[in-house]
């Protein structure tokens, strides 16, 4: 199994670990210490060695941080994790609603007379630190650079990952690494920069057409890079990782020990392009006044998928859909009350493994039945494994990492006879998902400008959900990829080639959860006779083709256009997937895609 069901952190482990951390704080003369989710590369996902937040607090979500003070320890989480954190941390930790309550506002309240709060400068982006320092100016609260105090008290901390790196074939990448390097180097030169510092692992993987396995479910390797305007790259990565890929990198890529990275940055001449949102403060400290905060040069080119990446992703989604449909067929044949969440996860992974192109799953499969479905990023363990009972909704959110693409799909499934309230909520979520699927919008708009279209049906009923409508997705890279997002806080204009999720939901704590998710790619919209000729428009091409549970739809709540969209979508699902399925799944698909 790719997925493990073991319990990785327990609430009762937190208090003694917090006490040990506070002892180290006292030794250093600190009143507090910051513990982020991030590692030195500032990506969303971390290796076991860097899971300091989970080790200390028990909270395993993919976003958040802890501030340990002498008398209180706040665990800051956003709306996705408000239910989860309450179950995972002991009473010694206080959940804090973030970003509604900012770090600086909380520190001002807890340290009214000032104090010294330590932080590891490798684990915090310079943009974050600068913003907090500005907000704390004049309060008497200092942020003090420190060794990592969690590492001091973590006796069995795992070793850094040293997994081998492989080349990513050109038929999937669609562009050689040499071409990417030269294209981005020319951009640097035109912008008056001599170099750019890159710390995000997926940016380095994309630029050099390589893939790794240092982080679970994400095909990336840890390292740093400096892209120079003359067209060469300094790669700071352990040599032992590059045994297989060294020749692939070519003469234009020079490999160095990671320990040499800071000195190399300090020695750069001219203006250096950086991303303040991902550049560790430790690197900013040696950069002096050379930095220009124009962002990661790989971010937008990586987000704009080329034709090979889009066609590969489309094909990966069809193979992945076949595995999901086979699983849904199997699931419907079981009697309510006879299956558990772990059995569903195991069956789905077995079906995905029949594809030789599968390299891994893209995240821990979320299979939350009944109340567990209301935990947005629920991870089933041997201890939480629950039975799929009659009347439950099952939220099944999963994906695969294939050589030609990364998938992410969510379906909410009726287990037996489901209540009318659940069906009404499901239908509102579906209406929002359809709203987004059919949207045309003027080029230049960002995710924040259009994401509300998926919330309108829920808003009309006084309901909403506490996560974004969609996130970017990589091409055999991270399942959560920036900078593109369908989010209230996303300022990045959507452009053709960007792949995002379309996943509205609804969650009622202690009762049920609902989410429906397809992946979509931005494209130029077909012209219309009524359109302004000078106004460029964009729309979506759907990549995900798996039936939506018709048993949960209140048909009278759908408009005629919404019914037409659903029936057309199901016709496409049947046409594209039927030839890829076994006999039983074909019969199941015929019923699941019948018109409404």
Image (tube, rainbow, N blue to C red):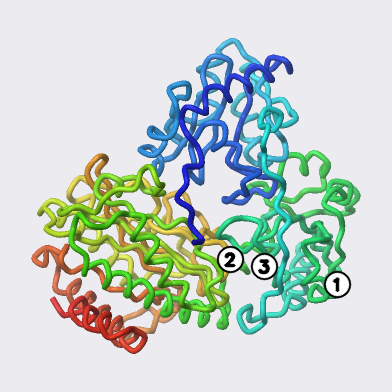
Q: Can the viewer see residue 193?
A: no
- Locate residue 299 relative to residue 224 in the image: left or right: left
Name the spot of residue 184 as percent of width and height, x first: 73, 69
Locate residue 520: give its quadrant: bottom left
Q: Front-most of 114 and 86?
A: 86
Residue 321 or 191: which is nearer the viewer?
321
Nearer-N-terminus badge (3/1): 3
**Distance between the Cα atoms at labels 3 and 1?**
18 Å
| N-term-proximal mark, 3 vs 2 | 3
Task: Identify the secondary structure beneath mark 1.
Answer: loop
Q: Residues within 10 Å of mark 3 (few under 14, many from 20)?
A: many
Residue drawn 77% across the image and 67% down it = 190
* Residue 89, image x, y percentages: 45, 30
Among all residues in the image, which is located at the extreme front? 338
- Position of 248 with respect to 433 (left or right) is right
On the image, numbered disc 2 is attached to which residue? 477
CB-based contact (under 8 Å), mark 1 and mark 2: no
Write the residue at 50% across / 31% down: 102
Which of labels 1 and 2 is toward the front? 2
Which residue corresponds to the image point at 45% horizontal and 24% vertical from the top-left?
Answer: 94
Mark 2: secondary structure:
loop
Foreground: 212 or 349?
A: 349
Q: Position of residue 369 (x, y in %)?
A: 27, 51
Q: CA distance from mark 3 to mark 2?
A: 8 Å
Q: Are marks 3 and 2 in contact (CB under 8 Å)?
A: yes
Mark 2 crowd level (few <14, some 14–19, many ≥20, 10 Å Cα): many
Label 1: few (<14), some or many (≥20) within 10 Å? Answer: few
Which quadrant of the rendered structure holds the C terminus?
Answer: bottom left
Mark 3 touching mark 1, by CB under 8 A?
no
Residue wearing tag 3: 211
């Amino acid at each position: 199994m790719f997925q493990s069901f073991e319990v990785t952190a327990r609430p009762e482990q937190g208090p003694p670990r917090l006490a040990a951390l506070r002892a180290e704080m006292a030794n250093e003369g600190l009143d507090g210490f910051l513990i982020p989710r991030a590692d030195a590369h500032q990506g969303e996902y971390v290796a076991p060695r860097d899971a300091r937040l989970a080790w200390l607090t028990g909270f395993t979500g993919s976003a958040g941080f802890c501030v340990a003070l002498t008398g209180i320890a706040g665990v800051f989480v956003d709306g996705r994790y408000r239910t989860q954190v309450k179950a995972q941390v002991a009473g010694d930790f206080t959940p804090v609603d973030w970003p509604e309550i900012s770090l600086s506002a909380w520190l001002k309240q807890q340290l009214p007379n000032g104090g010294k709060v330590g932080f590891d400068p490798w684990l915090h982006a310079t943009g974050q630190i600068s913003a907090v320092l500005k907000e704390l100016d004049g309060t008497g609260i200092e942020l003090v650079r420190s060794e990592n105090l969690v590492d001091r008290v973590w006796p069995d901390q795992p070793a850094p990952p040293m997994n081998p790196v492989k080349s990513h074939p050109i038929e999937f990448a669609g562009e050689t690494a040499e071409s990417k390097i030269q294209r981005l180097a020319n951009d640097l030169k035109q912008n008056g920069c001599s170099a750019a510092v890159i710390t995000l692992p997926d940016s380095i993987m994309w630029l050099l057409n390589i893939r790794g396995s240092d982080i679970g479910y994400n095909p990336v390797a840890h390292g740093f890079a400096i892209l120079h305007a003359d067209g060469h790259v300094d790669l700071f990565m352990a040599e032992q990782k590059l045994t297989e890929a060294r020749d692939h990198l070519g003469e234009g890529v020079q490999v160095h020990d990671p320990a040499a990275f800071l000195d190399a940055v300090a020695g750069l001449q001219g203006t250096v392009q950086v991303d303040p949102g991902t550049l560790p403060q430790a690197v900013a400290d040696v950069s002096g006044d050379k930095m220009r905060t124009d962002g990661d040069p790989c971010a937008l080119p990586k987000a704009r998928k080329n034709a090979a990446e889009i066609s590969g992703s489309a094909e990966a989604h069809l193979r992945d859909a076949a595995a999901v449909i086979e699983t849904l067929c199997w699931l419907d044949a079981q009697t309510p009350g006879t299956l558990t969440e772990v059995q569903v996860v195991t069956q789905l992974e077995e079906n995905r493994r029949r594809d030789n192109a599968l390299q891994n799953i893209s995240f821990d499969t979320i299979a939350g039945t009944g109340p567990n479905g209301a935990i947005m990023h629920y991870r089933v363990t041997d201890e939480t494994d629950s039975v799929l009972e009659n009347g439950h909704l099952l939220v099944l959110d999963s994906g695969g990492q294939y050589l030609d693409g990364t998938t992410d799909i969510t379906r909410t499934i009726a287990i037996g006879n489901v209540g009318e309230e659940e069906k009404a909520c499901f239908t509102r979520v579906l209406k929002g998902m359809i709203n987004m699927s059919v949207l045309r919008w003027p080029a230049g708009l960002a995710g924040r400008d259009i994401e509300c279209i998926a919330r309108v049906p829920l808003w009309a009923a006084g309901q909403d959900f506490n996560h974004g409508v969609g996130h970017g997705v990589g091409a055999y890279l991270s399942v959560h990829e920036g900078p593109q997002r369908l989010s209230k806080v996303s300022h990045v204009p959507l452009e053709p080639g960007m792949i995002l999720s379309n996943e509205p939901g609804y969650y009622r704590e202690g009762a049920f959860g609902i989410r429906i998710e397809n992946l979509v790619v931005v494209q130029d919209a077909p012209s219309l006779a009524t359109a302004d000729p000078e106004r460029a428009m964009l729309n979506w091409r759907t990549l995900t083709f798996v039936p939506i549970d018709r048993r949960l739809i209140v048909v009278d709540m759908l408009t005629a256009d919404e019914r037409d969209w659903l029936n057309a979508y199901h016709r496409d699902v049947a046409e594209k997937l039927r030839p890829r399925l076994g006999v039983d799944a074909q019969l199941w698909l015929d019923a699941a895609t019948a018109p409404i």
